[in-house]
């Protein structure tokens, strides 16, 4: 409709690529970096408190359990104290969820406000990442699904085209300068060094630049 067309006129001619990750939440092709909120003191402190409370709860259950007569099973009694602890745990949980949710809102709004005519994100294989025991917890806490959901509807509201790059598009392995594909790029290689043209660039920035140019003629 007319409204969307008007909004489109306000957009810049920038195609913005966004690389999502665990080290930082998002690296944009315009150089902007949005930190991983889970690495902040505030969140870490809450996580620590949560773990302490959970440990206390299981200890208290253990102390108060009653072995049923003749049976193998134990009966766990929920004391007042345990109830109180469980409520505290719930509150911390909610607080953490709110912090993460608000942060994703902040980041996606701030990205959309730069008014690119299109945004390109990766089709992250989140369920695949979740299978990795060492990563699954930090992947969950990054809320990638939410990020994609929010950036999608906010783009739509602002007349911005949202493109999800093909899952097999080698955004990290491709040299943004010359197009060479470095097949042996490792996850630990934080800097992309192109053996073909000699370019040296931050790995995630290189990926976001490739995403910004995704399928552009
Ligand atoms: Zn190169």
Image (tube, rainbow, N blue to C red):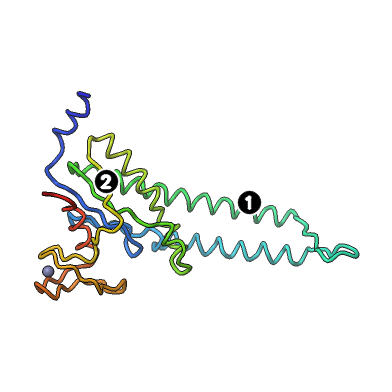
Depth order, front residue of 33/194 = 194
Residue 158 horizontal side relative to residue 94, left or right: left
Q: Residue at x 10, y 49 (%)?
A: 217
Q: Is mark 1 within 8 Å of ligand 1?
A: no
Q: Seen from this angle, which residue lies furthest top?
A: 2
Q: Position of residue 165 (x, y in %)?
A: 26, 52
Q: Is mark 2 within 8 Å of ligand 1?
A: no
Callout 2 crowding tier (Cα within 10 Å): few <14, some 14–19, many ≥20:
few
Query: Residue 91 appears at what percent x and percent y?
Result: 56, 50
Q: Residue at x 40, y 50 (%)?
A: 145
Q: Which residue is mark 2?
A: 110
Identify the secondary structure beneath mark 1: helix
Question: Of the residues under marks 1 and 2, which one precedes in the sequence?
Answer: 1
Q: Quadrant of the N terminus?
A: top left
Tell me where residue 200 appears, x and y as whole percent: 14, 72
> Furthest residue to the right?
70
Q: Residue at x 24, y 35 (%)?
A: 158
Query: Quarter-wise, where is residue 139 in the image?
Result: bottom left
* Mark seen at residue 198: none
Report the residue at 42% width, 48% height from top.
Answer: 101
208 with respect to 136 (left or right): left
Quadrant assignment for ligand 1: bottom left
> Is 124 on the left-hand or right-hand side of 77?
left
Q: Quadrant of residue 20?
A: bottom left
Q: Position of residue 12 (x, y in %)?
A: 13, 41
Q: Which residue is mark 1?
A: 87
Q: Are marks 1 and 2 in contact (CB under 8 Å)?
A: no
Note whether 129 is above or below 104 in the view shown.
Answer: below
Q: Secondary structure at mark 2?
A: helix
């Amino acid at each position: 409709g007319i409204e969307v067309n008007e909004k489109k006129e306000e957009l810049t001619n920038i195609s913005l690529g966004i690389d999502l990750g665990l080290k930082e939440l998002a690296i944009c092709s315009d150089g902007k970096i949005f930190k991983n909120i889970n690495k902040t003191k505030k969140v870490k402190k809450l996580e620590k408190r949560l773990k302490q409370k959970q440990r206390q709860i299981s200890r208290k259950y253990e102390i108060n359990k009653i072995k049923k007569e003749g049976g193998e099973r134990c009966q766990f009694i929920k004391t007042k104290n345990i109830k109180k602890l469980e409520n505290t745990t719930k509150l911390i949980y909610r607080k953490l969820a709110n912090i993460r949710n608000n942060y994703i809102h902040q980041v996606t709004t701030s990205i959309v406000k730069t008014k690119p005519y299109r945004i390109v994100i990766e089709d992250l294989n989140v369920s695949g990442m979740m299978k990795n025991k060492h990563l699954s917890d930090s992947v969950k806490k990054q809320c990638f699904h939410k990020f994609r959901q929010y950036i999608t509807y906010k783009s739509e509201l602002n007349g911005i085209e949202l493109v999800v790059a093909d899952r097999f598009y080698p955004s990290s392995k491709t040299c943004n300068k010359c197009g060479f594909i470095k097949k042996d790029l490792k996850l630990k290689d934080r800097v992309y060094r192109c053996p073909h043209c000699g370019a040296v660039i931050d790995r995630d920035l290189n990926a976001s630049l490739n995403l910004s140019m995704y399928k552009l003629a």
